[in-house]
Amino acid sequence: MGVVLGYIATLGVYFCTYNIFALGLNIQFGYAGILDFTVITFMAMGGYMAGVASLGPSQPGSGIYYILGLSLPWPLALLIGAAAAGALGYAVGLIALRRLRSDYLAIVTLAAGSIVLGIVGNSNGLFDGFEGLVGVPQPFAGVLNLSPNSYTLFFLGMCAVIMVICWLVANRIYNSPLGRTMRAIREDLDVAEAYGKRTFRVRMTAMVTGCVFVGIGGVLTIWFITALAPAGWGTSETFVVWAALIVGGRGNNLGAVVGSFLVAVLFNEATRFLPAIPSFPSLIPEIRNMCIGALVILTLWFRPQGVIGERKARFFEVPLRTDSLDLAPAPAAASTN
């Protein structure tokens, strides 16, 4: 029973983290139309910076080298990770958002992710290169002295609280004048500029805010698994986040929640615990990827707005009342004969 409970709690943690990822991407793409094809890179930045803020200084001769090592408490580490992801998003936005649109913007974000991956992986002094960080301390782990399953339940509650806060903030942005401006820019950037909207500033706000959300999810990820390496934030993880948002429905935060459950939990994470076939060890992962891809294709074909599409305002024409109007025909002109 304890194993099953721990398994369900683990899936719950993954659901919360992927939900935060999807909410961040929804602010960027669903609200403002920003094609961020390297969303998982900002997860890694948030996780890495929170990790080195939580860890102590790297010891000479240990074989593990990283910057900082501040031994800060978890709230400060969370803020540092979120701020680092937002700062990276701002740097990418300065290049990608000022003059580029649509597919060119997507290519720039993808290239930026590859550059960050190469720098982090080949610089052993930053975050221990391709080996990554290990042994990141978990919040309250040394204070509560809980069993592994009990701590997983506690961590799930912590993730759920943070997820709800992120969801409320995302909803507040959506219903605010800023959110309406973002959606106007998404629909037609030129028209929004013609009405005097500062489109670059608004899109940059969406970019940075989404990156902060994703960075928070990255902090929770490295705290939960206590490790993070470049192999864990490749393009496949970005594909999962995009699939969750497309299947659930862009522009709708409830759709991001549904997509995170369907794609990230049921298809991506729950299938990881299936027993591998000895003669075909990579069969299960390949089937998992094919299932997610097929789900995205079917969604785009039959329901492109997603399971829960965006609710757009509808304007109805007010019928013209004729009972109070004088619609009698005008009298004919008098004959001159």
Image (tube, rainbow, N blue to C red):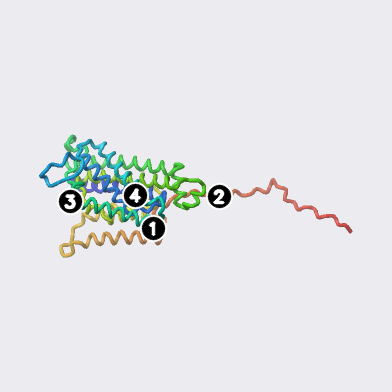
Height in image: 200 above or below 141? below
Residue at horizontal 40 percent and vertical 62 percent from the top: 301
Q: Nearer the viewer, residue 98 or 337?
A: 98
- The residue lying furthest to the right in this view is 337
Disc 2: which residue: 316
Q: Are marks 2 and 1 in contact (CB under 8 Å)?
A: no
- Kindly report the distance in space between the C-alpha atoms of the residues bearing marks 4 and 3: 25 Å
The answer to whether marks 4 and 1 mark residues whose Cβ atoms lie closer than 8 Å is: no
User: Of label 4 and label 3, which has the lower sequence position?
Assistant: 4
Disc number placed over residue 131 in the picture, else none: 3
Residue visible at 36% across and 56% down in the picture? 106
Q: Earlier in the sequence, mark 1 or mark 3?
A: 1
Q: Label 1 vs label 3: CA separation?
A: 33 Å
Circle 2 or circle 1, nearest the eye? 1
Residue corresponding to mark 4: 92
Q: Are marks 4 and 3 in contact (CB under 8 Å)?
A: no
Single out the mark in the foreground, 2 or 3.
3
Q: Say which amino acid is labelled 3.
A: Glu
Tag 3 secondary structure? helix
Image quadrant in which you'd find residue 154? top left
Q: Could you say where residue 232 lies in the image, as x and y percent from the top left?
A: 23, 52
